[in-house]
Amino acid sequence: MTRIYVPIDSAALALGANAVAEAVASEAQKRGLDVQIVRNGSRGLFYLEPLVEVETPDGRIGYSNVEAEDVAALFDAGFHEGRAHEKNVGVVDEIPYLKNQQRLTFARIGITDPLSIDDYTALGGLQGLRNVLDMNGDAVCEALLDSGLRGRGGAAFPAGIKWKTVRAALADQKYIVCNADEGDSGTFSDRLVMESDPYMLIEGMIIAGVATGATKGYIYVRSEYPHSIDTLNRAIDRARDAGWLGASVLGTSHAFELYVAKGAGSYVCGEETALLESLEGKRGIVRAKPPVPALVGLYGKPTVINNVITLATVPIIFAKGAAFYRDYGMGRSRGTLPFQIAGNVKQGGLVELAFGVTLRELIYTYGGGTASGRPARAVQVGGPLGTYLPESQWDIPLDYEEYAKVGAVVGHGGLVIHDDISNLAELAQYAMHFCAIESCGKCTPCRIGSTRGEEVIAKIREGDTSVKQITLLRELCDTMISGSLCAMGGMTPFPVVSALDHFPEDFGLPRTPAQKAA
């Protein structure tokens, strides 16, 4: 029997993967061929989707950008035996885009049926949890600290400190909450985890529960991810049936139950305290801190809140050891990060590499340059509230501290590439507009500052480039950064100020000698 893999990830589905799978099944039946179709997760090479793979003695041979109408011709060429065709891209594992990555968290994505527990365990899954069940909770928290894992949601706070705080807190109930409200532009790593390898997220949350004494967990998923929600619910049901969840985790005295909660589409609910409010059935409004959620979180109880990639990385740390993970990366940025390449780029997709890689490598070695063929001009890193980096900053190592030195953020690892016809003043104005729409409205700097900011940039773009207007815009940005309750208002000025500093000509302003030198 020949196994043929057709991805079931949202990106592949949007490009017709279901129709391709149906065509493969129909054509194989017509020809009397013994074929098993496996609906695997995506490899993250989105520029090749739908990427159909055929299992052969030489490895899994890929056929890129397959459409339903291509299937008959593919069978005529013998693709079910891995033979030559214009869409044949060779052994998928040998494609440089994939081969040159350092996949730790994403080691299994695209290889397995996302819902197969047998596939998951055959490829090392559950080993981390089994190791943790033999450890003391304090030792687990210390090991997480030793690994150097920091929150992958953007704040980069050491995950082990959160876990230790919750473990030490005295309460009759504790919670683990996964922030899967992936709303940043150009980001999709959380979705890939949930749709392509959901069990590693489930395992990571169980480990967190065992380590901290939490017995309930919630995965808060944005409503725009229906396939993720469905996959998670089905995976949780299977994990429960397999004895991972419930009153006795893998036959031990530890209890842990897990649920999926669907968000309502508010961007600000990606902020942890607004998420908690929403999870409690209230309007998603940011809470003032302190107290921190680790002490007073969901329903007023101690709560670990980590994002998807943070929790999904936990299993490999405990399967292979803290030192193994810590050996990747640079400085205080240890391990790997899934960089998501999007925007005006030829080869969009997910690239997992150790911290220290540069934007230039990601844009050209992996991304292949712009899709338009025009010169790349700016890259927004870290979502819609991230800074715009000009080419002079593309060789800075992607590291939390190195980026902070130039006023930039690594964030969730999302990169949106713009070519030389992009207008950065227009994009800066949109950042203020976005904040005005998405602000929860609780604090004045964010609620009013974003509205006034949009108005000031509009006046500048209309020709009023007086010192008064530029000074007003910069002072407004300073107020938002210093006075906002959360990152929604505090980071909205980042794209504005970076556009103003690095691309003044788009605002109708002359370049200063320092800007010319840069």
Image: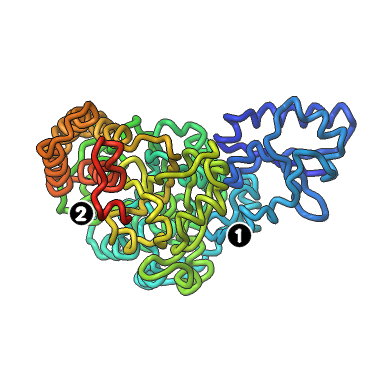
Residue 43 in the image: x percent, y percent?
Answer: 61, 47
Circle on res. 292: 2
* Front position in the image: 220 or 416: 416
Residue 1 in the image: x percent, y percent?
Answer: 84, 44
Left or right: 507 as drawn, with respect to 355: left
Residue 186 in the image: x percent, y percent?
Answer: 44, 41
N-terminal label among 2 and 1: 1
Residue at image location 15% in from the left, 53% down from the top: 290
Disc 2 marks a residue whose amino acid type is: Val
Q: Which residue is labeled 1 in the image?
A: 100
Disc 1 marks a residue whose amino acid type is: Asn
Q: Secondary structure at mark 2?
A: loop
**Is residue 241 visible in this depiction of the protein?**
no
Residue at image location 46% in from the left, 34% down from the top: 225
Q: How is the image coloured?
A: rainbow
* Front position in the image: 303 or 3: 3
Left or right: 441 as drawn, with respect to 64: left
Which residue reaches farthest right?
32
